[in-house]
Image: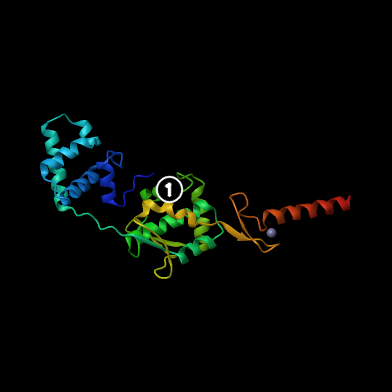
Amino acid sequence: MSEFIFDWGENCEKILNGEGYTTSKNQNMEQVALFRYLMDKNYDKEEIFEIWEETGGNILRGVKENSEEKQFIFEKLFNKALKWTMPPSNPIYIYQEEIDIINSMIVLRWIKEYLLTLLCVYKYYNSEWCQYNDKLRRFCFSVNSQRREWSSLGAKLSDCVKKYKPYDMFIKNGTLMLKMNITKSDGEVVETIPNPSHVQELFHLIKCEKVCKDCGKTFSYSSYTVNSEVCASCAKKRLYKLQYKCHKKQ
Ligand SMILES: [Zn+2]
């Protein structure tokens, strides 16, 4: 899983359950959020200090027990938390029509998963353009069946974007911005998730199917058969016919 945090409240619960911080390097923001979370639950400063000591973050590991340095770090984070507010949670509604659009594309499964993840992030931030950075891209790859970004995947993704235009991108003041074109806001809601880190719960909606050119039936395709125009049984029939023709020629 990537280090992307969407739901700060959910992340605070995770830390309090003893499951540790999500980010590996700079955990300041997570600690500020944790302090705010506890403040909102009416914990006083002393209690927050005691809870913080138990969380075992990177900063704590580097300082001595009861040291001035430890108190200093705590004060700094605490003052930041006083000014910070927990962003409101924003549930994501996924419409049947959005799933239909994704399913109608003849592309590999992981690309569909990638697009569905981007769609969730885009809907979560709820603005016309959303920032598209390395962190977000890593998150999108980490949740789908690729697990991580491989060098050859970018080209496959851009082929899909050229053909189906699921999103547009542009650079504004050196930042890459993204706008999804497959977003709907009415019709049948097929699934709701609290934030994009739950996107895998939607992957069962993804289908990789196409219509056979010979028999007209719908068949599922894999990465091996994504380019074939006919279903497995018609492909066999075509092969037999070809073999028969060759045999007759001889
Ligand atoms: Zn067929």
**In-front residue for pair 187/4:** 187
Instruction: Looking at the picture, tell me which residue is in the foreground, 76 or 102.
Output: 102
Q: Which residue is disc 1 drawn over?
A: 143
Q: Quadrant of residue 24?
A: top left
Q: Residues within 10 Å of mark 1 (few under 14, many from 20)?
A: many
Decide if residue 216 is on the left or right side of residue 116: right
Q: Position of residue 81 (x, y in %)?
A: 16, 49
In this picture, residue 78 sits left or right of residue 12: left
Please give left or right for residue 217 compared with residue 2 in the image.
right
Task: Place residue 173 in its image quadrant.
Answer: bottom left
Q: Residue at x 42, y 55 (%)?
A: 117
Q: Is residue 105 left or right of residue 215?
A: left
Task: Estimate the x, y position of residue 228 in percent, counting from the top left.
Answer: 65, 55
Seen in the picture, residue 76 relative to 199 is either above or below; the reply is above
Element under disc 1:
helix
- Quadrant in the picture for the N terminus: top left
In the image, what residue type sits under mark 1?
Answer: Val
Q: Residue furthest bottom?
A: 186
Q: Is mark 1 within 8 Å of ligand 1?
A: no
Q: Quadrant of ligand 1?
A: bottom right
Tell me which residue sits at (25%, 46%) in the image: 12
